[in-house]
Amino acid sequence: MGTLTLTQAEMLLGGLLLLALIALAWLLARSFGSERRLQGELSEVLAEQLEQRLGAQHREILRDLHEGLARQTDRIGDHARADRELLQRGLTAASMQLSRGMQALTQSVDGRLDTLSGQVSQRLDEGFRKTNETFASVMARLATIDEAQKKIDGLTTNVVSLQALLGDKRARGAFGEVQLEALVQNILPPDAFAFQAALPNGSRVDCLLSLPAPTGDVAVDAKFPLENYQRMFDADAGGLERRAAQTAFRADVRRHIDAIADKYILPGVTSDGAVMFLPAEAVFAEIHAYHPELVAHAQQRRVWIVSPTTLMAVLNTARAVLKDVETRKQIHVIQDALGKLAKDFHRFDERMAALARHIEQASRDVQDVQTSSRKISAHFQKIESVQLEDGETGEARGGRQT
């Protein structure tokens, strides 16, 4: 630092000397106009010398500055190496402590997981067993459906043209009876109906439904008034022919209603009403939409007109009634089953409570592990920021001195 101050003083003296010379030259130039050229040349020489001196002094200052920076860099490197060694020793100690803690934690968690695994395996075995039973039941039902589908496919391949079948009156009657039998057999149990049942008055009804009291036996007869219905919509027929066909159609339906009421409603034997089954939705819709007098006459005679769709609703209602009656008969069986179910549910509740206690204990263990993890993380943060405690630092220094 003394050398640097002396150099600056020399520079300052040189600068003042140059300024004095320049001032003298300027005064001489003003006093002697003839010596202006000499003054200019002298100024250039002095400026060049001043520039050279200043450059030399600047280079010397930069060299001193570089040497000081190099010495400072060496000192900083020494401190950094010492800090890295201290940090490395701290990380090694913390790593060993963390390894021991993780080993103990792993052993505890493995024990809890083994316990939970055994309980979960037991629950899964029970669930798989119930699933297999359900799957077997579904497969049996699918086999039944597949067999029914094969029968339907075989029937479809042997069906003749519907138009040719309905052209004959007897064929129409047989078609209505077959459709009626199919609907009844698909919905009601076998002991709830009888086909071509004989009545005390000597007549036979297409189907006799056996329903519980107070309804009793309900007669269902199939009718298919198709000829006059088709004439009503014949495009080649005139207006008079269509009106005549409409009148004949109403007469056919009224005659069927009266025949069913007279033959199949027997006091003390059957219910007080009977059912007329129309196997065509179009005929049923025509009667209810454009012939309300026929509907009123049927209600008066206690005859209920149904189509395939509405008959399905009636049969489903009858099946619900039969099921309710059977349920009431088997109420003691249901009570026994409910009692067994209550016992099973009680055992399930006890096992669930035990499982809940195990889960609660596992939750407490997890919280303890989280607490240890937070402490270890805090210790790591202190090490990373080189914030070791003074006592630990003093012990480390004392050990090195020893």
Image (cartoon, rainbow, N blue to C red):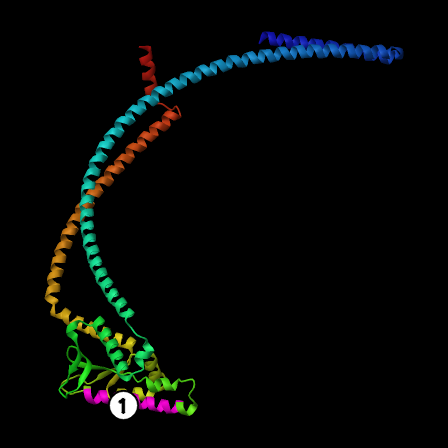
Is most of the magenta stretch helix, strand or loop?
helix
Q: Which stretch did the figure color magenta?
A: 242-263
Residue 277 in view (yes/no): no
Of 97 and 273, nearer the camera is 273
Give the residue pinned by disc 1.
255
Q: Position of residue 48 (x, y in %)?
A: 74, 11
- Residue at image point 57% right, 13% down: 66
For label 1, the SS is helix
Q: Is residue 379 magenta?
A: no
- Residue at image point 22% right, 38% down: 113
Q: Amino acid at mark 1?
A: Arg
In this picture, residue 365 sits left or right of residue 64: left
On screen, 7 above or below 160?
Answer: above
Of 122 and 169, nearer the camera is 169
Quarter of the image where one finds residue 225: bottom left
* Quadrant of the snapshot with the N terminus: top right
On screen, 96 above or below 368?
Answer: above
On screen, 79 above or below 322?
Answer: above
In this picture, residue 275 sits left or right of residue 19: left
